[in-house]
């Protein structure tokens, strides 16, 4: 390969591919473009270079090598091409092979040739917009060029780098390159713009290249030029712009600033001079004088001007209306220019407003901040003669009108501006139709009000403004010129229109109905272009009419007209086209909301040459899409998708928008503008938008504004400060400083003996942290900075000394951080840092703390305080801290906690520190600081600057404020005082400190300190320190505290806390005075002034101090009655009660009283007291009982109220912890009765708390204490008057209800206990009118008086109870009471609302008394119970939170009992009018229907059981009506269910497998009341016989219903009214019961078939019923196992021949196939079954199949059985016979064993066995028909038994015989004999063997004896049936054999049935 030709070819290819062309934008895009060419060609070139040894000289010596590089890296127009070329050259120079060979030989030549193009690269102005950062613009660029240069320079070896500036003939000189790069950076023009909108790739490239060069440390870096270059780079970063130098600084983009920071680090790395220079410049930036005070949590980047270039306005609370108005005004160029250039006319009224307005507009124009704070404008602007309230919402239109009106008065120029921009003229015209005159009035307007309500758009609203009204008829117009009535047209017209047409949409209306202001949110649209010509006067009124009126205008009107003409003087031709320039939107309601605006910028346009819209929302300004105006401004409705959990779908939800346009701003379009828009000139603009740009330039020049020097200076000072803060508060700068403080010092020479670097780094880091970093909002590296500063302080003590010296000389940092910083973490950090520094210096400086004092002259008075500690920076700093307290720190500053913590931590360091603080009088300084604000009466004069810090100031005088910031101060004072104690045990304080602490009258410092509740614990310690060995001072302290309590009263809580602390340690250190004695001596002087707090304090002390306890018990006479009873303040009485309880030394006893919500309630748990505690309790209790006699003086309500005795009785009640206390009451019973009667019982006071408390105590003292009850019943006066007690039953007054809820249970409980003690009292009380009143008015409200109602019903139970020894008179009284009370409840109570009282009363009153139930029936008991049932029924189904199960059961039970009793009465013919009262119950059918809705799986089992019992009685009592009501409902329900053929949704009480019992209550309710006793086969979880527990649960659930349906049919048969509906119902229920093997249907119809007098048509109806056919199919196909039940098998034997054709024609073959499959399956089961139980189940299944075959083959024998079926039958026979032989052998063995045992047991046992055998035989005969589908269980020792027929002979199970004729016949039973007619029995009776009737009466019987069946009850009948038993159907044993029950084992039955089948087949 020719390397030279290949390399040249590759260079040519890449040179051509990178060729710059002018039409590169039109190049076609192909898969093999220039980028791919460069990529593969460069890869090939690199491969050649690395494999060919001569490639390097060939490539690098090529004469076009330099141009080739320049073309590829700079001139190529496609950025991807340049990128691929540079990456290839990087691989060429810095790549390497696997063997380690590199391309370093190419590096120097390539770099040298690239550097030859450096000047050309500098000329390329590669500017990229930040929004397209990743997409470099097409054209020549230098970004990749500098990237390659930087990496190549980085790749130069250290040796070649040093040789480059040492050898003059080299290809490369890095030192020269450093100089060239510096010159290019310094001289490069300012291309980047503010707000990070553009990037200068050339500047960034030069900065990064310079950084790479400086890494090699060329001589330039250490030279003077190098330091000058460092200064230039610093200026590139931090030079501040001004009005004239807006372009500063040079580095504005983030990338450029990052590169510059990196360059500064490289310039300072390893060079001390450069580092010192850079350190000095950076330190100047962080000096406190270089900037204004930073705010806390400052981050200027969040507050910079919006990207779009506009500034917002801060919302001061509710100033959004002002912000939107100002933005609209500012965005009008004419208004902006005029306001900023306006000069006030000298009117002082608006000079301040104009100045603030100009400042606001200047800020919006020039500021670099995000938003302007209009607080100063709001202070000077007045509206309605009041300054603007920033918290009050105003109407935007009103403010806009007010503002431009004020602008008019600010000067002629502004007046002309307002008139031209906003002033229009509207005329009100009355045009006469009967004369030539026109009446016209003109008025100016600034805004046009547009109606929104009932309007669709702006045009309709303008039509409404200019609508024509006809004046005619009675409303004719009186012409002022003709003086006569004429017809006229009245209308308003626009005469002159302003340049800016403002519309106010009337969105607010006043509703005259609600008398409230409302907002109209209807849809109201407006156009982008508005044509106003149809509304102009000249177009609405004829010209000649207008001309005739011109000469008659008044002077004022002429002035208005002149104004209008001036407004249009500049218009050469009429133009009424307007375009939308702004919209103000209001969101919210009429009472409040928010304003924001959409405004169009007319001076600048977007990239496509269109006007740009912006959203102005307070401080936020951002671009807005004009296409969204309709959605944001038109109002109307909006639709959203909402998920509906009921329908499981997303629904459309519409609601009104609350945001809609409130003001519209339109600008008149010039003729040129109209023409341009109409021709769509925007679309014809050139691609570069030059036409739009030229228009923008013209407008910008036209509206160029020259700010006044004052405004320019003001705004640019603010901008400079903001930009400086923005440069400093950024993470890049923080990282730069981190490197300066942590990294650069490690690179500097280590031979510095003075260690200046460490000190410089410490200074910079501490200054940066404390001056800047702590103010930043974002400071994630704060912890690392603190660790760095701590490390530097630990390294050199000089750093610590500088730090403290700096703060000792200037307290700026302590002031700003410790005093004013609102961030606790910052204050704590600074405090800990200072303490750490002091600890570092302590080993060196502690000896100088007291200098010039020595240990021997500490008390030298000649030494001044000012010179103590001046030698140490530590003590000088601490003295400065004390000076801050004396001079600069206000005592009510929030943030003093860390300040005093610093002082306290310093004092805790040791004795030297405490001695120093004592010598400089720190105590008196702190006391003076604290007392300063007390002397000024809390008045603080704030300077103007301090108003800005008003949020940091709070008042100590605020009652709710406890200045916790001073806690550490008190701690420090207490520590210093104790440290001043000498070895002589006395304090050695200076006179100044001593006077400050305890000087003055009443110890003012201690008084105010305690009053302000400042660290009472340390205050107590301070008092302890001051009072030790000083009893006089201790007494003074107690006197001061007592005086404060007397003076402050209930506001003296802190003083009582202090008293508690003073007596907390009774045995304190030596010298401690006895504070408790002093306090108790003064206690009675203080208690009258503050009894509550005194008693509460004493309550706490008696618990802790035995001395206080003894003293309090001894003085009970002095305080119990005055404060527990006599005192009027309830809180005092409560405190006295608590004190009494606290006297008992038992913690649980006290705690229970304190935490008990109801103080009248008894102890919930027994209280165990010690003997001492019990003695104290009895002492207190006895003292209280003695006060019962005195308590009578306080029960007079007018004098003492009704509350004074509540707490007295509460404590008495609380003392009842055992029967002993109750017995102690006996001797005081008369005092209690004298208190109750008559002072408490008789006054008609509804809310009597004293009586309530007394009765509660009386009830508790009688509870479980019969002796106290006997005191009542044995006292005639008491028993006579105790029932007289005033009670008000106002159930609507909540206060009365609450009182009665507690009082009535106690009162009625006392009466109930008396009734239990005395029957005479019971009879007397039962006749009392107040008791009847209570039954009538209290018991109907159990929800309000639950316990009271319970007591009344318990009392009622006692009143109706009779005893064996009761006299006739007592029994008569009981009967009378029962009857009268029952009559009261039935006649007076509304059963619908008071159902609970009614049912509970009837439950007690009825009991088991036959006569009382008849009495209830006579007095409307059934209708009342029905109404109660209706309410309960509704609650049960509709209120899911109401569990009324027990109540429903009770009502149904009562109804059942009454009906049962009534039927018996009718049967016995005891009462004649029972039928009449039964028929008077009109709602009985409705009641029956509602009962059916309780029959579902949502009702608990108890409800269903009670419902079935009630339905049974209803059917037996009202037979005809119930049949007519119930049967159709059930038929309809079952029909719908079977037609749908789908399982129903079951409730919680439906049986489930594995269910452990039934839940008692469930919140799940049926969707509606409905009958649901259906069963679908799919609802079953297992087949019959699989799970016995589940089978039993299903049986319990469905058996009552099937039994009930059986009863219905038997009643129908008895009535001889068997209809098709009844038959259908019977069949449908039987069909659903097939899976359950229910025998009711089969047994019933078997009896019917064999009963002679029953109409045979019912059998025909059954056989023609489709449900019956379904039933037969279901049994034969799915449930053949049920044929093991004899009732079902006999039924099929009887009825199948009647319907076999319908069954077998459709199902014959499928049945055979089913049987075949079943035989195969059962055959396998027999072989695989192991357990006996499972084997019996298999045999039963097989036997069911065999019986089905017998039934089928008996009517239609098959010609030939399938072979598999025959084989299976034979297998059954063989297997069964084998099993029989095994069982027979086992039986013989068992019998032999039994015989052997019998011989041993003797004759007696043999006789017993014989008797037992005989009884078993009789039981079998009696229970022959009682087998309910119970499969025979195989026993371990089976015994074959034969059954007896009714004739006494043995017989086998009837087997159907095959028919020999074409018409098959069923197997015939024995020849029927004479028939005995009996009625159909119930299920319970029919399953037992029934007695035969002895007479052939031929009629239905009602019981065991044959009588005529009575008629059923109907509307025309006299009454219900007299039958008390369930009807039966009788049959003679000769007519049909009784149903037999085989007692054979399953295997025996199978073998026998197989033989029968074979015999049938043989026949």
Image (cartoon, rainbow, N blue to C red):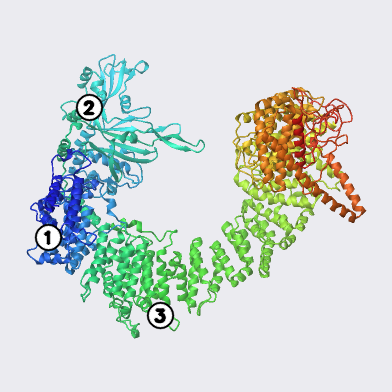
- The vertical placement of 263 against 1740, above or below, is below
Q: Quadrant of residue 1907?
A: top right
Tag 2: Cα neighbours inside 10 Å, few (<14), some, or many (≥20)? many
Residue drawn at 61 percent across, 31 percent down: 1541
The mark lying in front, picked from 2 and 1, is 1
Q: Disc 2 marks which residue?
A: 576
For the image, the number of numbered tags is 3
Which class describes the residues within 10 Å of circle 3: few (<14), some (14-19), or many (20+)?
Answer: some
**Displayed quadrant of residue 926:** bottom left
- The disc, 2 or 3, on the residue closer to the chain's N-terminal end is 2
The image shows residue 1686, relative to residue 923, as above or below, that is: above
Badge 1 vs badge 3, beta-carbon distance below 8 Å: no
Is 1921 situated above or below 199? above
Query: Which residue is labeled 3 in the image?
Result: 988
Foreground: disc 1 or disc 3: 1
In the rendering, at what x and y percent does residue 1261 appear? 71, 57
Q: Name the side, left or right, on which 1142 lies relative to 1683.
A: left
- Image coords of residue 953 (percent x, y): 36, 59
Left or right for 1010, reference 253? right
Q: Residue farthest to the right?
A: 1803
Depth check, front residue: 1883 or 197: 1883
Quick one: label 2 or label 1, which is nearer the N terminus? 1
Label 2: which secondary element? loop
Image side of residue 7 versus residue 937, left or right: left
């Amino acid at each position: 390969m020719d390397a030279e030709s290949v390399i040249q070819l590759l260079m040519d290819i890449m040179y051509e591919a990178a060729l710059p062309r002018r039409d590169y934008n039109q190049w076609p895009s192909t898969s093999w473009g220039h980028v791919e060419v460069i990529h593969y060609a460069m890869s090939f070139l690199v491969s050649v270079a690395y494999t060919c040894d001569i490639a390097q000289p060939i490539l690098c010596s090529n004469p076009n090598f330099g141009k080739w590089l320049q073309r590829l890296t700079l001139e190529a127009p496609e950025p991807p091409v340049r990128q691929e070329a540079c990456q290839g050259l990087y691989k060429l120079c810095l790549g390497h092979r696997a063997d380690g060979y590199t391309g370093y030989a190419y590096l120097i030549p390539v770099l040298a040739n690239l550097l030859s193009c450096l000047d050309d690269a500098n000329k390329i102005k590669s500017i990229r917009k930040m929004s397209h950062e990743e997409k470099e613009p097409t054209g020549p660029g230098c970004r990749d060029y500098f990237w390659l240069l930087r990496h190549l320079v980085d790749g130069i070896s250290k040796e070649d780098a040093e040789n480059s500036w040492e050898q003059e003939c080299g290809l490369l000189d890095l030192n020269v390159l450093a100089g060239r790069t510096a010159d290019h950076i310094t001289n490069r023009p300012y291309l980047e713009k503010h707000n990070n909108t553009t990037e200068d790739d050339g500047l960034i490239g030069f900065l990064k290249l310079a950084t790479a060069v400086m890494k090699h440390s060329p001589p330039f870096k250490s030279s003077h030029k190098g330091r000058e270059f460092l200064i230039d780079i610093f200026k590139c970063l931090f030079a501040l712009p001004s009005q004239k130098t807006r372009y500063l600084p040079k580095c504005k983009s983030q990338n450029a600033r990052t590169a510059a920071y990196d360059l500064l680090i490289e310039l300072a790395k390893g060079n001390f001079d450069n580092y010192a220079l850079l350190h000095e410049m950076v330190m100047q930036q962080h000096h406190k004088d270089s900037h204004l005070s930073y705010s806390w949590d400052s981050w200027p980047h969040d507050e910079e001007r919006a990207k779009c270039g506009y500034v917002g306005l801060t919302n001061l609370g509710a100033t959004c209306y002002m912000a939107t108005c100002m933005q609209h005004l500012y965005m009008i160029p004419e208004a902006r220019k005029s306001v900023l250039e306006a000069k006030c006319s000298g009117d002082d009224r608006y000079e301040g407003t104009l100045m603030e307005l100009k400042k606001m507009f200047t800020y919006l124009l020039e500021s670099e901040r995000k938003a302007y704070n209009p607080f100063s404008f709001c202070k000077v602007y007045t509206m309605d003669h009041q300054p603007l309230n920033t918290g009050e919402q105003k109407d935007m239109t009103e403010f806009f009108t007010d503002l431009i009106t004020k602008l008019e008065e600010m000067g002629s120029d502004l007046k002309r501006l307002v008139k031209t921009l906003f002033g229009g003229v509207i005329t009100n015209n009355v045009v006469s139709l009967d004369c030539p005159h026109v009446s016209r009035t003109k008025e100016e307007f600034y805004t046009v009000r547009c109606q929104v309500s009932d309007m669709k758009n702006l045009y309709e609203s303008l039509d409404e403004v200019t609508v024509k009204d006809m004046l005619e008829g009675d409303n004719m117009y009186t012409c002022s010129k003709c003086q006569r009535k004429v017809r006229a047209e009245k209308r308003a017209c626009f005469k002159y229109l302003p340049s800016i047409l403002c519309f106010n949409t009337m969105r607010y209306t006043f509703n005259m109905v609600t008398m409230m202001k409302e907002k109209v949110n209807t849809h109201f649209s407006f156009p982008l272009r508005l044509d106003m010509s149809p509304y102009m006067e000249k177009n609405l009124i004829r010209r000649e009419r207008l001309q005739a009126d011109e000469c008659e205008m008044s002077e004022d009107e002429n002035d208005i007209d002149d104004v209008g003409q001036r407004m249009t003087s500049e218009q050469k031709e009429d133009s009424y086209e307007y375009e939308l320039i702004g919209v103000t939107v209001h969101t919210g309601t009429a009472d409040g909301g928010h304003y924001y605006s959409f405004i169009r910028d007319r001076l600048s346009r977007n990239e496509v040459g269109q006007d740009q819209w912006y959203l102005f929302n307070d401080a936020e300004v951002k671009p807005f899409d004009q296409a969204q105006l309709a959605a944001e401004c038109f109002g109307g409705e909006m639709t959203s998708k909402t998920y509906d959990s009921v329908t499981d779908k997303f629904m459309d939800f519409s609601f009104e928008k609350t945001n809609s346009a409130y003001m519209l701003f339109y600008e008149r379009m010039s003729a040129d503008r109209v023409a341009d828009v109409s021709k769509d000139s925007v679309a014809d603009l050139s691609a570069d938008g030059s036409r739009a740009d030229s228009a923008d330039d013209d407008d910008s020049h036209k509206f160029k504004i020259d700010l006044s020097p004052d405004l320019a200076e003001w705004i640019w000072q603010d901008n400079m400060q903001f930009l400086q803060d923005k440069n400093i508060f950024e993470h890049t700068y923080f990282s730069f400083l981190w490197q300066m403080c942590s990294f650069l010092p490690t690179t500097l020479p280590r031979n510095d003996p003075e260690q200046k670097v460490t000190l410089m780094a410490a200074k910079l880091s501490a200054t940066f942290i404390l001056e800047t970093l702590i103010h930043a909002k974002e400071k994630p590296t704060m912890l690392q900075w603190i660790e760095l500063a701590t490390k530097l302080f630990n390294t050199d003590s000089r750093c610590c000394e500088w730090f403290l010296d700096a703060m000792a000389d200037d307290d700026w940092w302590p002031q700003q951080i410790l005093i004013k910083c609102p961030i606790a973490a910052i204050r704590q950090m600074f405090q800990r840092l200072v303490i750490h520094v002091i600890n570092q210096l302590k080993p060196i400086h502690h000896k100088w703390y007291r200098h010039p004092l020595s240990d021997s002259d500490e008390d030298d008075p000649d030494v001044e305080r000012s010179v103590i500690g001046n030698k140490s920076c530590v003590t000088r700093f601490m003295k400065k801290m004390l000076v801050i307290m004396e001079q600069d720190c206000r005592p009510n500053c929030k943030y003093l906690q860390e300040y005093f913590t610093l002082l306290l931590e310093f004092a805790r360091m040791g004795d030297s520190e405490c001695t120093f603080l004592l010598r400089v009088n720190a105590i008196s300084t702190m006391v003076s600081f604290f007392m300063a604000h007390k002397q000024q009466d809390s008045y603080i004069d704030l300077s103007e600057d301090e108003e800005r810090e008003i949020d940091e100031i709070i008042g100590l005088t605020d009652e709710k404020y406890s200045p916790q910031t001073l806690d550490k101060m008190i701690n420090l004072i207490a520590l210093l005082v104790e440290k001043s104690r000498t070895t002589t045990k006395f304090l050695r304080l200076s006179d100044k400190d001593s006077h400050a602490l305890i000087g003055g009258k009443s110890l003012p410092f201690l008084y105010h300190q305690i009053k302000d509740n400042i660290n009472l614990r340390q205050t107590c310690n301070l008092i302890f320190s001051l009072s030790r060995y000083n009893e006089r001072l201790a007494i003074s302290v107690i006197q001061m505290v007592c005086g404060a309590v007397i003076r402050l009263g209930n506001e003296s809580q802190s003083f009582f806390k202090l008293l508690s602390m003073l007596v907390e340690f009774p045995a304190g250190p030596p010298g401690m005075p006895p504070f408790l004695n002093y306090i108790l001596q003064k206690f009675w002087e203080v208690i009258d002034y503050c009894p509550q707090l005194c008693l509460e304090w004493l309550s706490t002390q008696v618990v802790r101090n035995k001395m206080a306890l003894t003293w309090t018990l001894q003085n009970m006479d002095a305080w119990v009655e005055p404060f527990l009873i006599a005192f009027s303040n309830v809180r005092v009485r409560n405190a006295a009660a608590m004190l009494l309880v606290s006297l008992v030394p038992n913690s649980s006893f006290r705690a229970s009283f304190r935490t008990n919500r109801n103080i009248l309630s008894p102890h919930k748990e027994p209280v165990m007291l010690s003997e001492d505690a019990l003695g104290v309790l009895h002492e207190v209790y006895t003292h209280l009982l003695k006060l019962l006699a005195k308590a009578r003086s306080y029960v007079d309500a007018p004098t003492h109220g009704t509350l004074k005795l509540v707490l007295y009785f509460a404590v008495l009640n609380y003392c009842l912890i055992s029967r002993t206390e109750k017995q102690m009451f006996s001797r005081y019973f008369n005092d209690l009765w004298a208190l109750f009667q008559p002072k408490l019982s008789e006054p008609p006071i509804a809310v009597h708390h004293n009586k309530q408390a007394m009765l509660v105590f009386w009830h508790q003292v009688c509870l479980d204490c019969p002796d106290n009850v006997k005191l009542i019943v044995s006292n005639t006066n008491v028993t006579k008057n105790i029932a007289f007690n005033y009670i008000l039953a106002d159930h609507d007054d909540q206060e009365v209800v609450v009182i009665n809820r507690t009082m009535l249970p106690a009162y009625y409980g006392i009466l109930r206990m008396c009734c239990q003690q005395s029957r005479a009292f019971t009879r007397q009380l039962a006749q009392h009118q107040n008791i009847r009143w209570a039954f009538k008015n209290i018991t109907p409200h159990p929800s309000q008086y639950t316990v009271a109602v319970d007591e009344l019903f318990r009392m009622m139970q006692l009143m109706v109870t009779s005893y064996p020894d009761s006299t006739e008179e007592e029994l008569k009284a009981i009967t009378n009471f029962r009857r009268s009370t029952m009559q009261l409840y039935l006649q007076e109570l509304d059963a619908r609302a008071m159902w609970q009282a009614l049912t509970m009363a009837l439950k007690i009153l009825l009991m088991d008394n036959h006569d009382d139930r008849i009495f209830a029936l006579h007095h409307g008991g059934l209708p009342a119970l029905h109404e109660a049932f209706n309410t309960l029924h509704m609650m049960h189904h509709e209120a899911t939170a109401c569990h009324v199960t027990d109540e429903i059961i009770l009502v149904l039970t009562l109804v059942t009992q009454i009906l049962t009793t009534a039927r018996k009465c009718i049967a016995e013919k005891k009462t004649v009018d029972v039928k009449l009262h039964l028929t008077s119950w009109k709602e009985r059918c409705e009641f029956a229907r509602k009962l059916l809705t309780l029959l579902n799986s949502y009702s608990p089992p108890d409800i269903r059981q009670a419902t079935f019992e009630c339905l049974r009685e209803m059917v037996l009592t009202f037979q005809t009506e119930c049949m007519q009501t119930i049967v159709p409902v059930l038929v309809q329900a079952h029909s719908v269910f079977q037609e749908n053929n789908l399982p129903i949704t079951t409730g919680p009480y439906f049986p489930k497998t594995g269910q452990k019992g039934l839940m008692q209550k469930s919140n799940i309710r049926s969707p509606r009341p409905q009958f649901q006793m259906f069963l679908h086969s799919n609802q079953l979880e297992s087949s019959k016989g699989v799970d016995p527990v589940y089978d039993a649960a299903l049986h319990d659930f469905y058996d009552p219903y099937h039994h009930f349906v059986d009863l219905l049919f038997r009643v129908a048969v008895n009535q001889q009214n068997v209809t098709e509906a009844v038959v259908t119902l019977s069949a449908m229920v039987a069909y659903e019961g097939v899976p359950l093997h229910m025998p009711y249907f089969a047994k019933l119809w078997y009896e019917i078939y064999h009963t002679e007098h029953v109409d045979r048509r019912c059998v025909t109806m059954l056989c023609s019923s489709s449900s019956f056919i379904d039933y037969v199919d279901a049994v034969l196909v799915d449930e053949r196992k049920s044929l093991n039940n004899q009732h079902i098998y006999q039924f099929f034997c009887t009825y199948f021949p009647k319907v076999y054709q319908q069954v077998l024609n459709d199902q014959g073959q499928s049945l055979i196939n089913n049987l075949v499959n079943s035989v195969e399956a059962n055959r396998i089961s027999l072989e695989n079954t192991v357990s006996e139980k499972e084997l019996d189940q298999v045999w039963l299944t097989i036997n069911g199949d065999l019986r089905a075959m017998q039934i089928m083959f008996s009517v239609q024998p098959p010609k030939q059985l399938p072979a598999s079926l025959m084989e299976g039958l034979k297998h059954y026979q063989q297997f069964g016979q084998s099993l029989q032989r095994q069982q027979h052998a086992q039986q013989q063995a068992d019998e032999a064993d039994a015989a052997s045992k019998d011989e041993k047991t003797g004759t007696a046992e043999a006789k017993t066995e014989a008797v037992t055998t005989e009884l078993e035989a009789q039981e079998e005969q009696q229970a022959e028909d009682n087998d309910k589908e119970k499969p025979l269980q195989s026993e371990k020792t089976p015994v074959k038994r034969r059954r007896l027929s009714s004739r006494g002979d043995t017989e086998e199970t009837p087997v159907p015989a095959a028919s020999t004729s074409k018409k098959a016949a069923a197997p015939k039973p024995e020849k029927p004999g004479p028939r005995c007619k009996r009625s159909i029995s119930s299920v319970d009776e029919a399953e037992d063997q029934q007695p035969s009737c002895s007479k052939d009466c031929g009629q239905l019987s009602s019981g065991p004896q044959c009588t005529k069946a009575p008629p059923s009850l109907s509307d025309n009948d006299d009454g219900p049936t007299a039958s008390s038993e369930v009807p039966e159907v009788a049959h003679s044993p000769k007519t049909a054999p009784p149903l037999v029950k085989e007692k054979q084992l399953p295997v025996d039955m199978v073998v026998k049935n197989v033989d029968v089948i074979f015999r049938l087949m043989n026949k």
